[in-house]
Image: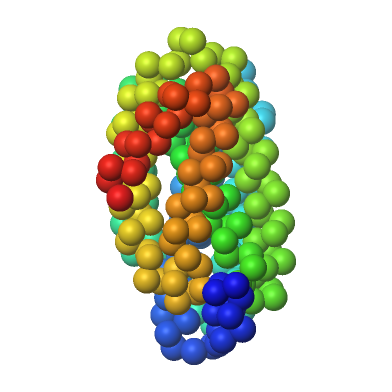
Protein backbone atom coordinates (compact mmCIF):
# COMPACT_ATOMS: atom_id res chain seq x y z
CA UNK A 1 0.00 0.00 0.00
CA UNK A 2 2.84 2.35 0.89
CA UNK A 3 4.40 1.74 -2.51
CA UNK A 4 1.13 2.52 -4.31
CA UNK A 5 0.84 5.82 -2.46
CA UNK A 6 4.44 6.64 -3.38
CA UNK A 7 3.73 5.83 -7.03
CA UNK A 8 0.74 8.16 -7.18
CA UNK A 9 2.97 10.98 -5.96
CA UNK A 10 5.79 10.29 -8.45
CA UNK A 11 6.77 13.09 -10.77
CA UNK A 12 8.74 11.42 -13.55
CA UNK A 13 10.07 14.79 -14.69
CA UNK A 14 11.19 16.19 -11.32
CA UNK A 15 14.90 16.82 -10.83
CA UNK A 16 14.96 14.41 -7.87
CA UNK A 17 13.45 11.60 -9.94
CA UNK A 18 15.59 12.26 -13.01
CA UNK A 19 18.77 12.49 -10.92
CA UNK A 20 18.08 9.08 -9.35
CA UNK A 21 16.97 7.67 -12.71
CA UNK A 22 20.25 8.69 -14.33
CA UNK A 23 22.00 6.09 -12.15
CA UNK A 24 19.29 3.38 -12.09
CA UNK A 25 18.85 3.59 -15.87
CA UNK A 26 22.63 3.40 -16.33
CA UNK A 27 22.77 0.31 -14.11
CA UNK A 28 20.22 -1.59 -16.20
CA UNK A 29 21.92 -0.52 -19.44
CA UNK A 30 25.33 -1.60 -18.14
CA UNK A 31 23.85 -4.79 -16.69
CA UNK A 32 22.52 -5.78 -20.10
CA UNK A 33 25.86 -4.89 -21.73
CA UNK A 34 27.73 -7.00 -19.16
CA UNK A 35 25.34 -9.87 -19.84
CA UNK A 36 25.82 -9.51 -23.60
CA UNK A 37 29.60 -9.74 -23.23
CA UNK A 38 29.42 -12.52 -20.65
CA UNK A 39 27.29 -14.75 -22.85
CA UNK A 40 29.69 -14.26 -25.74
CA UNK A 41 32.54 -15.35 -23.46
CA UNK A 42 30.50 -18.33 -22.24
CA UNK A 43 29.92 -19.31 -25.87
CA UNK A 44 33.71 -19.58 -26.23
CA UNK A 45 33.96 -21.65 -23.04
CA UNK A 46 31.02 -23.91 -23.97
CA UNK A 47 31.30 -24.47 -27.73
CA UNK A 48 28.65 -27.22 -27.61
CA UNK A 49 26.15 -24.53 -26.47
CA UNK A 50 27.53 -21.77 -28.66
CA UNK A 51 24.41 -21.21 -30.75
CA UNK A 52 22.12 -20.86 -27.72
CA UNK A 53 24.55 -18.59 -25.86
CA UNK A 54 25.01 -16.29 -28.86
CA UNK A 55 21.22 -16.09 -29.10
CA UNK A 56 21.06 -15.05 -25.44
CA UNK A 57 23.80 -12.45 -25.96
CA UNK A 58 21.82 -10.88 -28.82
CA UNK A 59 18.71 -10.71 -26.64
CA UNK A 60 20.68 -8.85 -23.96
CA UNK A 61 21.87 -6.39 -26.59
CA UNK A 62 18.25 -5.71 -27.59
CA UNK A 63 17.34 -5.19 -23.93
CA UNK A 64 20.12 -2.61 -23.64
CA UNK A 65 18.66 -0.65 -26.56
CA UNK A 66 15.23 -0.78 -24.95
CA UNK A 67 16.51 0.70 -21.69
CA UNK A 68 18.47 3.36 -23.56
CA UNK A 69 15.13 4.37 -25.12
CA UNK A 70 13.60 4.57 -21.62
CA UNK A 71 16.23 7.14 -20.64
CA UNK A 72 15.69 9.17 -23.80
CA UNK A 73 11.94 9.11 -23.20
CA UNK A 74 12.45 10.89 -19.86
CA UNK A 75 15.25 13.07 -21.31
CA UNK A 76 17.74 11.59 -18.85
CA UNK A 77 21.43 11.01 -19.61
CA UNK A 78 22.51 7.75 -17.93
CA UNK A 79 25.54 7.98 -15.64
CA UNK A 80 27.53 5.20 -17.29
CA UNK A 81 30.71 5.87 -15.29
CA UNK A 82 28.75 5.18 -12.10
CA UNK A 83 27.24 2.01 -13.61
CA UNK A 84 30.58 0.58 -14.72
CA UNK A 85 31.95 1.13 -11.22
CA UNK A 86 28.77 -0.40 -9.78
CA UNK A 87 29.37 -3.65 -11.68
CA UNK A 88 33.17 -3.61 -11.28
CA UNK A 89 33.30 -6.36 -8.61
CA UNK A 90 31.20 -8.89 -10.49
CA UNK A 91 32.82 -7.88 -13.79
CA UNK A 92 36.32 -8.52 -12.47
CA UNK A 93 35.37 -11.82 -10.87
CA UNK A 94 33.75 -13.01 -14.11
CA UNK A 95 36.79 -12.02 -16.18
CA UNK A 96 39.16 -13.76 -13.76
CA UNK A 97 37.06 -16.94 -13.75
CA UNK A 98 36.77 -16.93 -17.55
CA UNK A 99 40.55 -16.54 -17.92
CA UNK A 100 40.98 -19.58 -15.65
CA UNK A 101 38.36 -21.58 -17.59
CA UNK A 102 36.03 -21.75 -14.58
CA UNK A 103 32.75 -22.24 -16.43
CA UNK A 104 30.82 -23.01 -13.24
CA UNK A 105 31.84 -19.72 -11.60
CA UNK A 106 31.03 -17.78 -14.77
CA UNK A 107 27.58 -19.37 -14.93
CA UNK A 108 26.87 -18.64 -11.27
CA UNK A 109 27.82 -14.97 -11.71
CA UNK A 110 25.94 -14.39 -14.97
CA UNK A 111 23.15 -16.95 -15.19
CA UNK A 112 22.23 -16.96 -11.52
CA UNK A 113 23.39 -13.85 -9.65
CA UNK A 114 23.07 -11.22 -12.40
CA UNK A 115 19.89 -12.70 -13.86
CA UNK A 116 18.22 -13.03 -10.42
CA UNK A 117 19.33 -9.48 -9.56
CA UNK A 118 17.82 -8.23 -12.83
CA UNK A 119 14.55 -10.14 -12.41
CA UNK A 120 14.14 -8.86 -8.83
CA UNK A 121 14.86 -5.27 -9.87
CA UNK A 122 12.53 -5.39 -12.86
CA UNK A 123 9.74 -7.01 -10.82
CA UNK A 124 9.96 -4.18 -8.28
CA UNK A 125 10.28 -1.47 -10.93
CA UNK A 126 7.37 -2.44 -13.22
CA UNK A 127 4.55 -1.36 -10.81
CA UNK A 128 6.11 2.10 -10.33
CA UNK A 129 7.54 2.74 -13.82
CA UNK A 130 6.31 5.32 -16.30
CA UNK A 131 4.08 3.82 -19.01
CA UNK A 132 6.82 3.66 -21.67
CA UNK A 133 9.39 2.03 -19.38
CA UNK A 134 6.80 -0.39 -17.97
CA UNK A 135 6.05 -1.82 -21.41
CA UNK A 136 9.77 -2.22 -22.21
CA UNK A 137 10.57 -3.80 -18.83
CA UNK A 138 7.67 -6.26 -18.94
CA UNK A 139 9.04 -7.60 -22.22
CA UNK A 140 12.57 -7.82 -20.87
CA UNK A 141 11.72 -9.68 -17.67
CA UNK A 142 10.07 -12.52 -19.62
CA UNK A 143 13.35 -13.03 -21.51
CA UNK A 144 15.43 -12.98 -18.33
CA UNK A 145 13.66 -16.06 -16.98
CA UNK A 146 14.82 -18.00 -20.06
CA UNK A 147 18.40 -16.80 -19.46
CA UNK A 148 18.21 -17.93 -15.85
CA UNK A 149 16.89 -21.27 -17.08
CA UNK A 150 19.96 -21.91 -19.27
CA UNK A 151 22.29 -21.68 -16.26
CA UNK A 152 19.97 -23.75 -14.09
CA UNK A 153 19.73 -26.56 -16.65
CA UNK A 154 23.48 -26.72 -17.33
CA UNK A 155 24.44 -26.60 -13.66
CA UNK A 156 21.80 -29.19 -12.73
CA UNK A 157 23.23 -31.55 -15.35
CA UNK A 158 26.74 -31.03 -13.92
CA UNK A 159 25.75 -30.57 -10.27
CA UNK A 160 27.89 -33.18 -8.53
CA UNK A 161 31.14 -32.10 -10.17
CA UNK A 162 30.21 -28.40 -9.86
CA UNK A 163 29.04 -28.26 -6.24
CA UNK A 164 32.36 -27.31 -4.60
CA UNK A 165 33.09 -24.58 -7.16
CA UNK A 166 29.50 -23.28 -6.90
CA UNK A 167 29.83 -22.90 -3.13
CA UNK A 168 33.14 -21.06 -3.49
CA UNK A 169 31.75 -18.79 -6.22
CA UNK A 170 28.72 -18.04 -4.06
CA UNK A 171 30.98 -17.18 -1.11
CA UNK A 172 32.99 -14.76 -3.26
CA UNK A 173 30.17 -13.08 -5.16
CA UNK A 174 26.99 -12.97 -3.09
CA UNK A 175 28.36 -10.35 -0.65
CA UNK A 176 29.02 -8.09 -3.66
CA UNK A 177 25.28 -8.10 -4.43
CA UNK A 178 24.53 -6.74 -0.97
CA UNK A 179 27.04 -3.93 -1.40
CA UNK A 180 25.39 -3.15 -4.74
CA UNK A 181 21.92 -3.06 -3.19
CA UNK A 182 23.11 -0.78 -0.37
CA UNK A 183 24.75 1.53 -2.89
CA UNK A 184 21.49 2.27 -4.73
CA UNK A 185 19.09 2.23 -1.79
CA UNK A 186 18.41 5.99 -1.88
CA UNK A 187 18.06 6.15 -5.66
CA UNK A 188 15.70 3.17 -5.67
CA UNK A 189 13.61 4.83 -2.96
CA UNK A 190 13.29 7.96 -5.12
CA UNK A 191 11.82 5.70 -7.81
CA UNK A 192 9.38 4.26 -5.22
CA UNK A 193 11.22 0.93 -5.02
CA UNK A 194 11.69 -0.48 -1.52
CA UNK A 195 15.06 -2.04 -0.73
CA UNK A 196 13.53 -4.67 1.56
CA UNK A 197 11.20 -5.84 -1.21
CA UNK A 198 14.09 -5.90 -3.67
CA UNK A 199 16.22 -7.99 -1.30
CA UNK A 200 13.33 -10.37 -0.62
CA UNK A 201 12.60 -10.83 -4.33
CA UNK A 202 16.28 -11.46 -5.09
CA UNK A 203 16.58 -14.04 -2.30
CA UNK A 204 13.46 -15.86 -3.53
CA UNK A 205 14.71 -15.94 -7.14
CA UNK A 206 18.23 -16.97 -6.13
CA UNK A 207 17.03 -19.59 -3.64
CA UNK A 208 14.71 -21.14 -6.24
CA UNK A 209 17.56 -21.26 -8.76
CA UNK A 210 19.85 -23.00 -6.26
CA UNK A 211 17.06 -25.45 -5.44
CA UNK A 212 16.45 -26.20 -9.11
CA UNK A 213 20.16 -26.97 -9.56
CA UNK A 214 20.14 -29.51 -6.73
CA UNK A 215 20.98 -27.79 -3.43
CA UNK A 216 18.97 -28.78 -0.36
CA UNK A 217 16.97 -26.28 1.71
CA UNK A 218 19.66 -26.40 4.40
CA UNK A 219 22.36 -25.77 1.78
CA UNK A 220 20.43 -22.79 0.40
CA UNK A 221 20.06 -21.22 3.85
CA UNK A 222 23.79 -21.63 4.43
CA UNK A 223 24.70 -20.24 1.01
CA UNK A 224 22.33 -17.29 1.36
CA UNK A 225 23.87 -16.36 4.71
CA UNK A 226 27.03 -15.16 2.93
CA UNK A 227 24.99 -12.37 1.45
CA UNK A 228 23.14 -11.52 4.65
CA UNK A 229 26.36 -11.24 6.64
CA UNK A 230 27.48 -8.55 4.22
CA UNK A 231 24.27 -6.55 4.51
Q: Which colour scheme appears in the figure?
A: rainbow
Tell me, yes or no, if residue 95 can be seen here.
no
Q: Position of residue 17 (x, y in %)?
A: 47, 81
Q: Give how far across and how far down residue 203 sits, in percent.
A: 48, 43
Look at the picture and state if 53 lies above or below 13. above
Residue 227 lies in what quarter of the image? Answer: top left
| Residue 3 visible somewhere in the drawing | yes
What residue lies at 37% left-to-right and 64% top-to-bottom?
A: 184
Left or right placement of residue 227 versus residue 132 in this view: left
User: Could you say which is closer to the camera, residue 130 or residue 185?
Assistant: 185
Q: How many marks?
A: 0
Vertical position of residue 172 compared to residue 87: above or below: above
Q: Is residue 228 above or below residue 76?
A: above
Residue plotted at (41% across, 27% down): 105
The residue under the point 44% across, 24% down is: 218
Classify 5 as above or below 224: below
Instruction: Determine the image quadrant of residue 148.
Output: top right
Camera-nearest residue between 202 and 15: 202
Kindly indicate the quadrant of the structure image that contains residue 80.
Answer: bottom left
Q: Nearer the viewer, residue 38 or 124?
A: 124
How far across and how far down the image is residue 21, in percent? 47, 74
Q: Residue furthest left?
A: 230
Q: Is residue 164 left or right of residue 117?
A: left
Percent position (x, y) of residue 150?
A: 62, 30
Residue drawn at x 57%, y 61% as measured from the top left:
124
Quadrant where the image shows the N terminus: bottom right
Amino acid sequence: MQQLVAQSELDFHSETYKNAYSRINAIVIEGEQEAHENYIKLAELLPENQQELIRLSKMESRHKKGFEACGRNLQVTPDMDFARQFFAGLHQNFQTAAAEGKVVTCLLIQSLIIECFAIAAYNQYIPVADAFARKITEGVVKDEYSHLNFGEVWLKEHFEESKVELEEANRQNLPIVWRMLNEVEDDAENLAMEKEALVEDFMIQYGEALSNIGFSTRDIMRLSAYGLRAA
